[in-house]
Image (spheres, grey):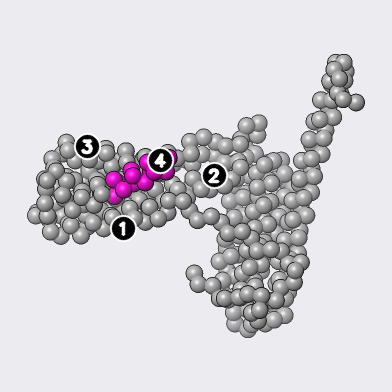
Amino acid sequence: MAQRYGGRFSPEGTRDRTAPAAPPLRPPLMGRARTSILMALAVVPVVAAFVQPGAVAVAVNLLAGAVLFGGAWLTREGLRAEAAWAERRVARRPAVPRKMLGSVVTGLGVLLAAMTGAAGLLPALVYGVIAGALHFVSFGPDPMRDKGVEGVDAFQTDRVARTIEEAEKYLAAMQDAVLRARDREAQTRVAAVAQTARAMFRTVEDDPRDLSRARKYLGVYLMGARDATIKFADLYAATRDAGAKADYLTLLDDLQRGIDSKRETLMLGNRADLDVEIEVLRDRLKQDGLPTGE
Amino acid sequence: MGSDGVRKIAFSALAVLILLGGLGLLDGGGL
């Protein structure tokens, strides 16, 4: 979406230096362009369908187009899931291996398309297998293993994953709603809050025991912020009320500061746990008469 | 040439295969 231009010398561009820095951009999805090409190629059998002799050939060609498009879509979803898997430090493997399913479906699409040519069923099958294999080589397998869940109980990680999923929804809703306010500064601030919140998500993922302590921030507060954002966007779009904007930005600042300090407390908690572990081990070593460097 | 090159070639081949298959040109067929 187009963004209103703004810089240091723009009317709304004067920001104090203590304001949080703009969040880094998320990297674009790898391989997205290739799935777009595949989607575009799905049009070919559809166009060719109308010069086919016989109704069955037309139908098969149309079906081939639909199947190829489906394969490309599955691949894109698979890439998205893989990116999400790569971003998180604790992640379960995707429930459905979408990329590999995309390979199979693409092969099926080529099989259908080849069937309407002069090729019989057997050559068409071979073409389908080749296409599936090429697709697999070019997009690779899905992530097939759980990551970073050693020594963490599965029930807790699931709870964390669910809570963070919910929290991500609140963030997305906030970022969506603030667009309606048509105010760059508010958008930037909301993006910064989202960035801070995501940093906290990662901390909680690292140690699921933090969940109970961070729960308020992941749930109630973000939900409140989302509701406030919706109200603010509606009001500000209609009235451009500067007071409302100032109040809203203060709220965002408070929220961001709150999240940040909570995250630091969580880290300190982890540190304390580590200190206890080290202390216990050192005591044991000392008891067993091993040198501990003291 | 790394695995990235292999991926690119595989993808190009796939694109050509879909194009020819879609046009019904595989196996010497024709429009």
Secondary structure predominantly adopted by residues drawn in magenta: helix
Amino acid type of the residue tagged 2 in the rendering: Ala
Amino acid type of the residue tagged 4 in the rendering: Met
Residue B11 inside the magenta-drawn segment: yes
Residue hosting label 1: A40
Disc 4 versus disc 3: distance between alpha carbons? Answer: 28 Å
Label 3 resides on the chain identified as A
Residue hosting label 4: B1
Q: Residue at x 39, y 48 (%)?
A: A75
- Mark 4: secondary structure: loop
Highlighted magenta segment, given as a residue range: B1-15
Q: Are marks 3 and 2 in contact (CB under 8 Å)?
A: no
Q: Nearer the viewer, residue A290 or A178?
A: A290
Where is residue A143? Give x, y as percent.
Answer: 48, 39
Residue A226 inside the magenta-drawn segment: no
Tags 4 and 1 both on a single chain: no
Q: Which mark is residue A126?
A: 3
Front position among marks 4 and 1: 4
- Label 3 neighbourhood size at 10 Å, few (<14), some (14-19), many (20+)? some
Up the image or down, A64 lies above or below A174; here it is: above
Residue placed farthest to the front in the image?
A: B1
Q: Residue at x 78, y 35 (%)?
A: A274
Q: Tag 2 or tag 3, which sits nearer the N-term?
A: 2
Disc 3 versus disc 1: distance between alpha carbons? Answer: 23 Å
Residue hosting label 2: A86
Amino acid type of the residue tagged 1 in the rendering: Ala
- Mark 1: secondary structure: helix
